[in-house]
Amino acid sequence: MSHNSGMPPSSDGLRKPKSTGKKTKSKRPSGDQPGHDGVTKNRSDDVDYTEDHYPTVCAGCGGSLTPDTTATVRQVHDVPKWQPLEVTDHIAWTCHCETCGVSTTGDFPADVTAPVQYGQRMSELVVYLGVEQMIPLRRISHVIAAMTGTRLSQGTVYNMIQSFAQRFQAVHTHIAELVKHEPVTHFDETGMRVDGSLNWMHTTGTETHCYDWLGTSRGDVMEDATGVAVHDHWPSYLSRQPDVQHAFCLAHLVHECKGLAESGETWAKEMTSLLYEIIRLDQLGSPLSATVIETIETHFDELVQEGLRYHNQLDPLPQKSRGRTRRRPGHNLALRFFHYRDDTLRCLHNPLVPATNNLAERDIRPLKIKQKISGSFRTKAGAQDFAVLRSVLETARKRQLNALDVLGTNPSELMVQFASEAPPPDT
């Protein structure tokens, strides 16, 4: 089940068991709580249209009326009426020199390269719908047709997305360089069907940047990262990132401990409570005293030793003639806690390191949504293009930039913006 393993919640089916998590039902009513600052839409001074509504007859006697100076105003904010595309003729004139007789023709804009083509704003809208909103190619064509009366072919939609991916390739590489030198970086990966075979989409993120890329295996992790790498203890991170400090996601460890606790291992049940407490303290955001840290570490060490004693007294599993020593899942987890104690509890000592890898989980979730909507990518190039544009737009979102504005920004200017300090979240 998803609550005690790495399986997604969708794998539970329709009959899901009753939750046994630590969350308890709140006694507060649903909706806004007392003291919450509400948001009310204000009137705008920039009015495009005005409609006057006069009464036709007197509501009292039915007689005629004369205009008065008293009025009540209500304002409606709406999207403009759908209309056909704007069509612009670019005319390059040829002029003759009266002095030497040479004919000179004017230059077309750099982005006007064909006798008839779609403009920049159309391409930006297509990319936004396909990458940010993850709408399939055929449905993008339907949306554009409903809005403008113009139906794009799926090939045209694909070419627009591919063109923008090529345009922002340098920005994608720039984001990778920025991310790998951050003091704390989050990593995650997910399987993705591409051209009929299994590939892996990887994500590396911080609070202000997101870098996605396509790998042929789950082990194709970023090898030249620095600082602290937060992840779910996938072995490739440990073997291919030797120059970084590691921090394990406690939420993943909670799932493993809950599975063992349900099978009767009491030490794992107590470890679940301890990990939940560490996560709760991390969410409070206050520095921990040395006494609190020492108490947590002592309890952690005691539970690990209890788990090792429990499994050492059990009969060993039958062994194969070759390969690693076979152990029970609980025994392996206790040994992992023992050998990677500092990596498991790193969030206690480094205030920059969170207790969970939720940031990377949030960054990877849109990729799974894309897979659920479209099923798979038909080509590897299409998957790579999606990773490039997704990285750019997700980084823009984290930095509170408008996605459509970003798609219309020069890549060189965008790299400067992405390298600058991001605004605070509440601005």
Image (tube, rainbow, N blue to C red):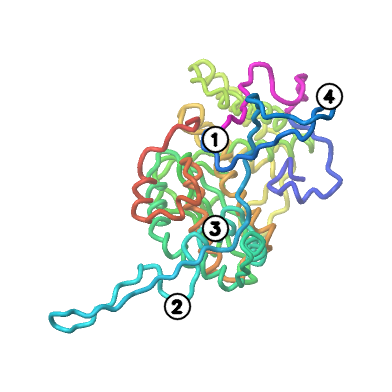
Query: Which residue is the site of mark 2?
Result: 115
| Residue 169, percent from left and from top | 42, 61
**For the residues marked 3 and 4, what is the alpha-carbon distance in whole angstroms?**
54 Å
Assess whether mark 1 and mark 4 are in contact (beta carbons under 8 angstroms). no
User: From mark 3 to mark 1, how far is it between C-alphas?
Assistant: 44 Å
Query: What is the magenta range?
Result: 22-43
The tally of labels here is 4
Q: Is residue 42 magenta?
A: yes
> Which of the marked residues, 3 or 4, is nearer the chain's N terminus?
4
Q: Amino acid at mark 4?
A: Gly
Image location of residue 185, percent across then percent down: 46, 42
Mark 3: secondary structure: helix
Q: Amino acid at mark 3?
A: Leu
The tag earlier along the polypeptide, 2 or 3, is: 2
Q: What amino acid is found at the position of numbered circle 2 in the picture? A: Pro
From the image, tell me which residue sits under label 3: 125
User: As shown in the figure, which amino acid type bears the numbered disc 1?
Assistant: Thr
Can residue 253 be seen in the rendering of this structure? no
The alpha-carbon separation of the residues under discs 2 and 4 comes to 66 Å
Name the N-terminal-most of marks 3 and 1.
Answer: 3
For numbered disc 1, what is the local secondary structure?
helix
154 horizontally vs 159: left or right: right
The residue labelled by disc 4 is: 60
Q: Is residue 263 visible?
A: yes
Secondary structure of the residue carrying numbered label 2: loop
Q: Residue tagged by mark 1? A: 344
- The picture quadrant where one finds residue 255 is top right
The residue positioned 47% from the left and 47% from the top of the image is: 395
Q: Quadrant of residue 195?
A: bottom right
- Could you tell me what secondary structure mostly forms the magenta stretch? loop
